[in-house]
């Protein structure tokens, strides 16, 4: 546990580079001098704080970026309504001991509109989340690439909750030989198993109870017999029994390719689930060991 600090909030690329680059202390071990980036869109909850806490174990120069990235929102999505709570976020990061917050404006990140060069996320990006959010992952990978170039971290930290995002970032880092290592932190859940998400704040009490169906479905799959088919059937039954949850997709993917496994798959896999609860879209995932 680190001492509470007052994080420096940097709004421009030039200031961020100047402060983070100059923070390295001669004589400190390379480990302590490591730059660690936690990209976020703010509205921080305990899941984000777990990412920041892990970052602080990995190096001293921790930068949490807070930027609601317009490129990853579709025209019908909640860009304007997305919660923006910078003051509270900075205070919570200060309690953890995070020294730097990078909070650029959209103009600082995208000064020349329309945006010209973008990263293309590849075929897996049009499945699952990408099927209902076309272009979403191109937007994510474009901003992540920009943040990696701006901060130049040794390590970048992501949450396992966004499994497809993690897969696509890892794939991009490998495909483009980006000089950064990707650290993945397990999903943080409330006592009832609901994965923490900034969007949980849109749920009323009944919907919050209904939203538990997603993690309950994953647990049912993990203990089901009957291979891939049995796991999907068990999870589907849990979602179908919850009147407030409307299933979008439920799929078992191969951890290496993130493509759906065949019915005869054995060994490690990952189940992904997405559902609408009221007007809120929720996702969750968990590893599966198919015997
Ligand atoms: O996971 C998120 O909050 C966002 O997709 C990210 C990685 C910060 C990019 O905007």
Image (cartoon, rainbow, N blue to C red):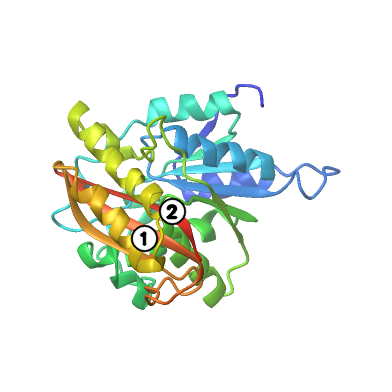
SS category of the residue bearing label 1? helix
Image x and y of residue 112, in percent: 31, 62
Q: Which residue is mark 1?
A: 231
Q: Earlier in the sequence, mark 2 or mark 1?
A: 2
Check if mark 2's residue and mark 1's residue have beta carbons within 8 Å: yes
Rendered location of residue 137, percent (x, y): 34, 64
Q: Position of residue 61 (x, y in %)?
A: 65, 42
Residue at position x 31%, y 54% in the image: 235
Residue situated furthest front in the rendering: 225
Q: Which residue is mark 2?
A: 222
Q: CA distance from mark 2 to mark 1?
A: 7 Å
Q: Is residue 242 above or below residue 147?
A: above
User: What is the quadrant of residue 44 in the picture?
Assistant: top left
Q: Nearer the viewer, residue 221 or 271?
A: 221
Q: Give the class, few, some or many, for how many residues have Cα within 10 Å of label 1's Cα (few <14, many ≥20).
A: many
**What kind of element bears circle 2?**
helix
Residue appearing at x 33%, y 52% in the figure: 69
**Relative to residue 119, is residue 10 depicted above or below?**
above
């Amino acid at each position: 546990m680190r001492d509470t600090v007052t994080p420096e909030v940097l709004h421009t690329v030039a200031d961020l580079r100047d402060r983070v680059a100059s923070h390295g202390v001669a004589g400190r071990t390379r480990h302590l001098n490591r730059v660690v980036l936690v990209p976020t869109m703010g509205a921080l909850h305990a899941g984000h704080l777990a990412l920041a806490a892990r970052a602080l174990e990995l190096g001293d120069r921790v930068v949490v970026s807070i930027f609601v990235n317009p490129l990853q929102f579709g025209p019908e999505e909640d860009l304007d309504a997305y919660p923006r709570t910078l003051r509270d976020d900075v205070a919570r990061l200060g309690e953890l001991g995070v020294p730097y917050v990078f909070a650029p404006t959209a103009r600082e990140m995208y000064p020349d509109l329309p945006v010209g060069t973008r990263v293309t996320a590849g075929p897996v990006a049009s499945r699952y989340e990408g099927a209902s959010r076309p272009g979403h992952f191109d937007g994510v990978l474009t901003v992540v690439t920009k943040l990696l170039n701006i901060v130049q971290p040794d390590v970048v930290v992501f949450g396992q909750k966004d499994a497809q995002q993690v897969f696509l970032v890892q794939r991009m880092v490998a495909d483009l030989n980006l000089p950064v290592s990707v650290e993945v932190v397990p999903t943080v859940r409330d006592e009832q198993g609901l994965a923490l998400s900034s969007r949980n704040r849109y749920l009323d009490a009944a919907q919050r109870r209904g939203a538990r169906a997603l993690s309950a479905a994953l647990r049912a799959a993990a203990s089901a017999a009957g291979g891939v088919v049995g796991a999907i059937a068990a999870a589907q039954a849990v979602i179908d029994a919850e009147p407030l949850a409307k299933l979008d997709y439920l799929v078992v993917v191969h951890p290496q390719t993130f493509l759906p496994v065949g019915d005869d798959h054995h060994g490690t896999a990952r189940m992904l689930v997405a559902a609408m609860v009221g007007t809120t879209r929720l996702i969750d995932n968990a590893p599966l060991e198919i015997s």
